[in-house]
Amino acid sequence: MQLIFERSRAGRSCSILPACDVEKTALPETMKRASAPRLPMVSEIDLSRHYTELEKHVHGVNDGFYPLGSCTMKYNPQIDEEIAALPGFTGVHPLQPMDTVQGSLEVLVTAKTMLCEITGMDDMTFQPAAGAHGELTGMLMIKAYHQSKGNTERNKMIVPDAAHGTNPASAAMAGFTVINVASNEKGCVDLDQLRKAVGPDTAGLMLTNPNTVGIFDENILEITKIIHEAGGLNYYDGANLNAIMGIVRPGDMGFDVVHLNLHKSFATPHGGGGPGSGPVGCKAFLAPFLPLNNPAFSADGTYCLSQPEQTIGSVKAFYGNFLVVVKAFTYLLTLGAEGVPEVARNAVLNANYLRVLLSKKYDIAFNEICMHEFVMSLSRMHRENGVSAMDIAKAILDNGMHPPTMYFPMIVEEALMVEPTETESKETLDKVAEIYLGIYDQAITNPQSLHDAPLTTPVRRLDEVGAARNPRVRYQFES
Amino acid sequence: MSYIPSSQQERQEMLQTVGVAAMDNLFAVVPSALQIKQLNLPSAKSELEVSRMMRKIAGKNRVFSSIFRGAGAYHHYIPAIVKSITAKESFLTAYTPYQAEISQGILQSIFEYQTMICELTGMDVSNASIYDGASAAAEAMTMCHERKRDRVLISATVLPMVIQTVQTYCNGNDMTVELIPEKSGVTDIEALETMLNDKTACVYLQQPNYFGMLEAAEKVGEAAHRAGAKFVMGINPIAAAVLKTPRDCGADIAVGEGQPLGMPLSFGGPYLGFMATNTAMTRRLPGRIVGETVDIEGKRAFVLTLQAREQHIRREKASSNVCSNQALCAMTASVYCSAMGPSGLQEVANQCHAKAHYAARQISAIPGFALRNQGEFFHEFLTETPCRAETVLAKLAEKDILGGYPVSNGILWCVTEMNSKAQIDALTTALKEVSLACN
């Protein structure tokens, strides 16, 4: 494929702006840039065809099965897009007077009320733009809380080894020392290890439940109690909420702060990496620490932005990725009280159905009733046949499907993490199982064919080592 | 309605295969005392009901036909092709391009975006974008953090929300933040000289600044470098088409809010944080970076690269926790820059500059609305106000004009290519009436 810069021809342009209707002005020579930025010079048809070609080399949710574990690649409803594109939402400036943005504030406050009900929290900020951003926000709130109590020695954050990599990174960004605790043989929190890890320096625990192997930790109340009794707070990583929403609430499990990924559980599209939205909910005692500009309902019956008294400040300008919240809110209104638990039940049913079908040949780590996802281990296959999780994933690409998440969680060797989501049908799952089981047989009879995969994709396996060793991260213009 | 395709019959068949009798049995491991009976939420609604309801809510917002407000979010024309390309379903619904073989479209679009950001800033390397301009500024401070250098000096002429965000992040990583005072609407360089020392990690300057003024960026950069500190510039990407690049001003890192490049105002988001730096600091950049490579057949291809910096490998030792980017917003910016082209983007910048100067001449001639600061400005300027800013702005609102933003007992006006001469003249006429009523 040509780069847009390679399509560029001097003298081409799109016709966009009228001529300037006021007297021209000039910048002082000392402030001017030396030469114009070398942006592409293209006509509209060049530009249009360029991106049409690029789109053919992208796999989206509508291009086929997308079981990327921990990412919840469910279908993104069309109505959500249509509503978020309404001029009433896109055309408002974030610094307009409050009486002219009551619609936007109503969306934020009502969405907050509904998400607090689902999570068992009392208040929520929409400022964080992503899950990891939410984690940082939650960590800073926990830090501010301990500092407000004069407990500056509480500087250790406990993170299980099965956690998402963002958890320890976020805790470190907030200035905490990370204490890793090993998981037990079921991939769950080892209570003895946890008891040994807590102490007067414990700030809190970061946990996702169901965990990253798709198992609901049945000791959850004991876990959160151990942390609370040690004086710490419990942080819930909401990446896996799709499994349990409407069934059980993080707030009832003993969590004090949660982040949600609206781009996972609440069906907003991932956009190839973003924009997402990572709202952070908290119990009432932590609400004074929420970020600035917290949408609220004021005493005079209008919506407003309130300023929490002991706020951590801001993690982003303005009030978060507003249009993403509009989409999630639209989705939530459609689901309603009945639809939310139906999502969880069917996400869990689909995962278990596929797990059972695949367990005919594949080794499943922790092969028991799982939640919304499960993890296969290609460790034995790798040992016996030399075929790795990567090889299997690349063979899946040749079947027009997106592979599962590879090599995560780290506690399972040669891991493939499968999350089908509730929006896949039985016949899709049957077809997937047939293909995956066929690949398994192929791995045994003809391992070389899997090392060679993929064969049918627009490009084949890439030289990633070379890319990192000799970084070329921008187009180099001739001369 | 929950977008679940399987029928009751199919669900029963699947349950049978799994070996459980009912859906609820799948959750047997969840302590029964914790299981909730019923969520206190409104009941499910049809698409038509939701559509009506949301349109009604959107109708409670007021969209002004004439906008003279910026202060961190800017009203620019968005070419039709920007919207049509970024609405393409595969771009919209794909995840982060982990599987490069089937994600070349997104990877290449990010590579092109990185190149355009390098061109706008003059820097060597750009990341794949992050959340917004404020968080980009905050991440840049962390990039400059060294064992013996933990002081951030940030100009008081920077957008307040950026200062707040920098402060919040720095509370996390134990950097101290000090404000460089303002003098006549720009950074007080003499004061800066006295603040710099061997503990200073970096100096952060915004160009054009919060008050719209153009800073003597090179002088600030030189002062920072003399003290061994890094120089970070926050820039407006439209102004960047015509202003001296951060590279030429001596910046080590350039960041900014990419919203003006084709993103609607949208009550504050989603927007786009761009970040670029020099080759030496590449490995300190947070977030995703796309690099060029080849496949096993030697064909050019693109891939997420330099991942040894990142959290999924380094965990608590990572340069940042950022594991996503604003890919669709980055694509928006790329399509916008391509549609405008080099001369088109410079034309947008020149029209902003010309119209803002025309408006400033007209407005400042009205009694009570004198310019607060003397000196060069880009497309925003601060004036006095003859009576309370809110009173002035309410009068303008009656004429469907969103006036400037109340700042420091004055009004901060913003004028872009969207404001026709007729709109500016109508604003001036309205302000004359207000002026008479106030005096």
Image (spheres, coloured by chain):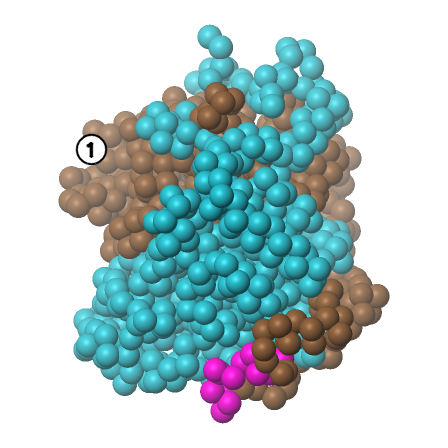
- Which residue is labeled 1 in the image? B228
Q: Residue at x 37, y 82 (%)?
A: A219
Q: Nearer the viewer, residue B364 or A346?
A: A346
Type of secondary structure dominating the magenta stretch = helix
Q: Which colour is chain B painted? A: brown
Q: Residues within 10 Å of mark 1 (few under 14, many from 20)?
A: some
Q: Position of residue B271 (x, y in %)?
A: 56, 46
| Residue B275 vertical position relative to residue B354 in the rendered view, above or below | below
Q: Residue at x 17, y 45 (%)?
A: B147
| Residue B380 vertical position relative to residue A368 in the rendered view, above or below | above
Q: Position of residue B117 (x, y in %)?
A: 49, 30
Q: Position of residue A270 (x, y in %)?
A: 58, 51
Magenta part of the chain:
B23-34
Name the image quarter holding the N terminus of chain B.
bottom right
Q: Nearer the viewer, residue B246 or B11?
A: B11
| Residue A252 vertical position relative to residue A469 in the rendered view, above or below | below
Residue type, mark 1 in image: Gly
Q: Nearer the viewer, residue B382 or B85?
A: B85
Q: Is residue B285 left or right of residue B236?
A: left
Q: Residue at x 61, y 46 (%)?
A: A401
Would you say residue B25 sits in the magenta stretch?
yes
Would you say residue B221 sits in the magenta stretch?
no
